[in-house]
Image (cartoon, rainbow, N blue to C red):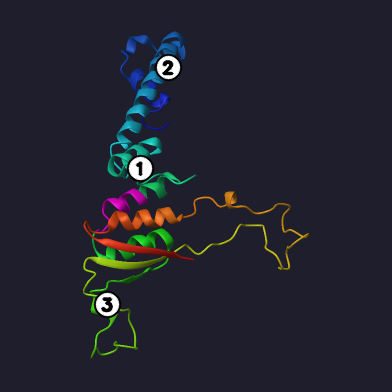
Amino acid sequence: MATGDQQDVYRRLRGYLPPWFGDEADTQIINGLLNGLAYAGAYVYGLLAYARLQTRIKTATDGWLDMIAADFFGSALLRAANQSDESFRARILINIFRERATRAGLIRILQDLTGRTPVIIEPLRPADTGAYGGPTIGYGVAGAYGSMLMPFQAFVTAFRPAGSGIPLIAGYGVSTGGYGQPSRASYASMAMIQGSVTDADIYAAVDSVKPVATIVWTRISG
C-alpha cells in the first residue's frame, strides 16, 4: 500500500465511518461502495501528482518536456529520436543557461554537440594571428594572417563527431567480414545511423551563440 493508491484511500475512508457500521468483514456492501470511491480518489490523486511534476523543468516528463523546449527555443531544440526524458531535460537546462556571445561559449557548444574542439581564428586577435616581436609567434612561426579590414569577424573550423561505425556489420577487407562474406547478412546504409549530428545542426549551433552584428565564417571538417 502506497500513499494515494486505492487501498490507501479506502483505508482513509473506512477510518471516517462511525463504529456502528460494524466490522469490515460484515459490511460487504459498504466496502464495495468505499472501494469504488477509493478508485476514483486514487485516480485523481495520481493525476494531481502527475500535473505537479509538469510544473518544473527538473521533474517534467513526456510531451510536457517537448512543450517546455518549444516555449524557450521554438523549433531550435527538438527531442532526438528515441531520446529519454533525462537526456532531453539535460539538453534543455544546458541551453537555457548556456554562455553566449563569447568565444568560450562558441567553443563549448561545439564541444557539447560534436565532442571535438573547434579551431577559431579572429583576424583582429594577435593570439590567433601572431605578431611581430611576439614571444612564440610571428611571421613564419605560427598563427594565421590577420587583417584590420575584418572587424567583428571570425573563422571557425568545426569537426564532425567521430563515428563509431554500425554495430555487427564489418567493412571490406576485414577478417570478420567483407565482400561476399558479411559479418551480418545485410548492407549498411545511412538510414541505419540514428541520432547523428548533421552539418545543419553544427551551423545552427554556431548561429545560436554568436554575437549579434558579427560574421562567423564556418567550415566543417570530417
Q: Residue at x 47, y 62 (%)?
A: 161
Q: Please tell me whether residue 13 is drawn above or below residue 75 in the rendered image.
A: above
Task: Kindly report which numbered mark, 2 or 3, lies closer to the viewer in this rendering.
Answer: 3
Q: Secondary structure at mark 1?
A: loop
Using residue 48 as the reference point, say whether residue 2 is left or right of it. Answer: right
Quarter location, residue 60:
top left
Judge by depth and name the residue closer to the eye, 116 or 88. 116
Provide residue 215's location: percent of width, then percent of height: 27, 61
Give x and y (percent) for residue 208: 30, 54
In the rendered structure, which segment of residues is drawn in magenta?
91-100
Q: Which amino acid type is shown beneath numbered disc 3?
A: Gly
Label 2 to label 3: alpha-carbon separation = 79 Å
What percent of the width, then of the height, locates residue 174? 71, 68
Residue 200's spot in the image, x, y percent? 42, 53
Q: Which mark is residue 146?
A: 3
Q: Earlier in the sequence, mark 1 or mark 3?
A: 1
What's the CA distance linking mark 1 and mark 3? 37 Å
Q: Secondary structure at mark 3?
A: loop
**The residue under label 2 is which amino acid type?**
Asn
**To which quarter of the image does residue 14 belong?**
top left
Q: Which residue is mark 2?
A: 35
What residue is disc 1 on?
75
Label 1: few (<14), some or many (≥20) within 10 Å? few
Comes first in the chain, label 2 or label 1 = 2
Q: Reply yes or no: does residue 97 show up in magenta.
A: yes
Q: Amino acid at mark 1?
A: Ser
The question of residue 16 being in magenta is answered with no
Q: Marks 2/1: CA distance?
A: 46 Å
Instruction: Sort mark 3 into few (<14), some (14-19) or many (20+) by Cα contacts within 10 Å.
Output: some
Callout 2 secondary element: helix
